[in-house]
Each structure stands twice: as structure tokens, then as C-alpha cells.
Amino acid sequence: MKFLHTGDLHIGKIFHERSLIQDQQHMLNQLIQELLSCSQNSAEQDLFMQPYQALVIAGDVYDRAVPAPEAVALFDEFLTTLKQKLPELHIIIIPGNHDSQRRLAFASSMLKFQKIHIASTIQDALTPIIIDSVAFYPLPFMNPNFLEDGQTSQQGMIQTAVERIRNYHQEHYPELAKVLVAHLFTLGGTASDSERVFIGTAELVDGHLFQDFNYVALGHLHRRQNPGGGNIWYSGSPLAYSFSEAGNHNCFLKVELHPQKNTTAEKYTIDVSPIPVEPLHKVCRLEGSFEEFYQEAEGKYQQYKDCYLEISSTDLSPKENPIALLQTRYPYLLSYRQDLATANTSSVTMEQRRQLIQQAGEDSFPTPEVFTAFMQDIYQQLPDNFDQELELFKKILEEMK
């Protein structure tokens, strides 16, 4: 059997104050086309090409527990289109740590009749979705006290849940292959800046817990990876959601399970293949001086014009409003880092800040000069509308005196 594994869609994500709804719609359209490519009957189609029987979404459907209306509308449109075009396709969805389990599971009992399976409880995880010779166990992200025994660590909760699944499977479906769908952070996995993580190592889960599953479809980490080898896979997010993910080869994973008969039992081999996703706007990082990008006489960086861009400046002195100046050439420039300039001027700047505060006095209200310095420290450069903000600050200051 064949299914498509993805996750960490983060629909509704805001990336450096820019909505990614159009980017995500572009990505979801590619997901639909991939599912259709092996399912439409035509004279030209390879007769030996097996259609996808399931789509697995391993958590973080939305970017927030209370998603924006346009995010909900986009996912609704996606599911509706899929079921219109592929009514026999099973869609298996679990909530991730960004999702609200109850909100995501709205109407889940009714949606089961449409072969849309949304798991939100441990009971759902112990009710496998049987597709041909494979049992899918959808395990939702487990917040502290998700189980009735009061456990709080991910390792302990996952271990208990997996033992229950393993025992249930052995009792009811020992002849079937078993696939676990989960949203967690395994030991040995590589994280990026856009994953929401906990403090310490309480969330880390030992991958050895899953060694007897035929395949483990994981979500949470945004890079495609196979931590520890074997059949444990993260599909990664289908789009890059931070500049630390620039250069990621974002994809969906095509998974094929093949039964192999021998004299003792029926085993399964597995093939995992990445299906590349072409983003509407690539996420890129560049480095150089301000003048190098501003003059750009040779068209050296024109290929990045349509990219979501972060520039790390090599200048030793800061530039004011560099993003506003450079966006005429790079309309999708979202971040301009002046780390070298900040480090170079930090000692002088700190002394200036100290003098401003001393002049104002410990018990007095902050002055407009202190407010201006504060805004520079926070944003590295003053916002475009800073004049209006400064006037508002002065007005509030007068009312407080």
C-alpha cells in the first residue's frame, strides 16, 4: 500500500509580519496534484502505478490554537477539494503542539464517514484505521496529564501509550502491519528556530520505543530526517518557516509498504521517497555590505528578488532604515541583521544609555531621548512610523505628569 506523509503545515503562519496564506495555498495545491497524479485513470497512465490510499498529516495543522478565519477557510477548502476529487482517499490527521485538540476535532465523528480521521484522545489512538493490510494508529500530541495516570513527561506518556497500542495490536490485528502517527521530539532529531520547544529535555523521546512499528510518521521537527535510521521519519514542514530553515529541501514523503512472504511470517519492506515542494517564495539568507546590495550594479542578486530574504550586514557602522531602502530592489526582504555594527558600537552605546538615564533621574519619567534609544535597541533601527509613535509618547508623558 502507498500513502503520503506530511505535517507541520502551520496554516496561518505569520513570517516576519507577512501572512503566508498564499504561499500555503500554493503548497497545498501541489499536495493535491501529487495525490491526484497516481489516482487519475487515463490511457497514458502507467497501469502498474498504485494510487495513494491515504494522506497522513502528523500534527501542527494550524500555527495557533485559535487559528485565523482565513487559515480555517484554506484548510476547509483543501479538504473539500480532496474529497471531491478523491472520495476513497483516507485522510488521517492528528493535532500537534500548536493545535487545539478540541477545535481541530470539531465534527470528527461525522467526518469519519467521509474517511477523514481526526484523532484527539487516547481512545482514538487505540482505534486504528485499517487500510488494506495496514493498521494506522493516530497518536495526538500529548500535553501534560493527557493520560488518566497523571504523567507529565513526554517520554513517560509516549511509553505508556505505545505499550497500550502494541498490546492492542497484538491482541486484535497481529497479522497486519502497524504504522504510528505521532507529533514529538525524538532523541537525535535536529530542530530549527521555528519549532516551539519546551525548557530542558522533558519532551525528548527515545526512538527505541518505536522499533517494532513498520513505519513511524512523525511531525514536529521541520527538517526531513530519519533519526536513528530504521523506519522513523520526519517529513519536515513543506515550507520553510524561519531563516534557519533556508536551504532545507522541503518535501512530502511518499511511503510504500510491500509485503514479503517467507516460510515463517509475512514481513514488510518499506520505500520512502521525497516529493519536492516548489515554494511560491524561497527563503534565503545573504551576507554583504549595505552598498553592495543597494548599488547592485551587476545584477548579482537579481535571482533573489522574489525570495523571502534575510541579509546579514558586514558593515561596522549601523544604517538607518535599511529595509525600507532595500525593499525597492528586494520587495520580499524581511530581515536585515546588523550584528557586527551592533557589537562594534555596543560599548559606546551602553555608556550613552547610562548617561541618558542618569540625566533623567531614577524617580522621573523616561524622556523622549530614552524612549528613542529604547526603540533603537529593540528594533536595531527606528520604525518607519517612529515620528508618530514619538509624538504619541510625548502626549502620554504629558498626561502622566
Image (cartoon, rainbow, N blue to C red):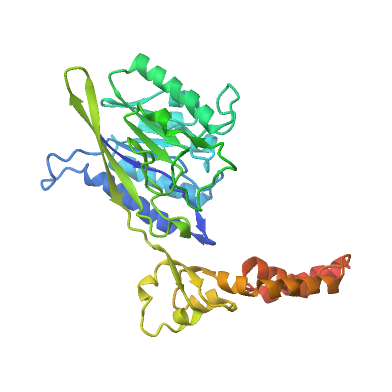
Q: Is residue 361 left or right of residue 49?
A: right
Q: Nearer the viewer, residue 222 or 126?
A: 222
* Residue 150 vertical placement versus 340 (above, below): above
Q: Is residue 367 visible?
A: no
Q: Is residue 240 left or right of residue 17?
A: left
User: Total marks drawn?
Assistant: 0
Percent of width and height locating residue 293: 45, 79
Task: Report the residue that reaches farthest toward the top.
Answer: 171
Percent of width and height locating residue 72: 48, 47
Percent of width and height locating residue 109: 45, 28
Percent of width and height locating residue 1: 24, 33
Q: Answer with the quarter of the image where residue 214 lies.
A: top left
Q: Residue at x 44, y 43 (%)?
A: 189
* Residue 179 vertical placement versus 355 (above, below): above
Q: Is residue 330 left or right of residue 134?
A: right
Q: Residue at x 54, y 34 (%)?
A: 102
* Residue 397 vertical placement versus 9 (above, below): below
* Residue 70 vertical placement versus 47 (above, below): below
Q: In the rendered view of the protein, which quadrant contains the C terminus?
A: bottom right
Q: Is residue 38 visible?
A: yes
Q: Nearer the viewer, residue 208 or 285?
A: 208
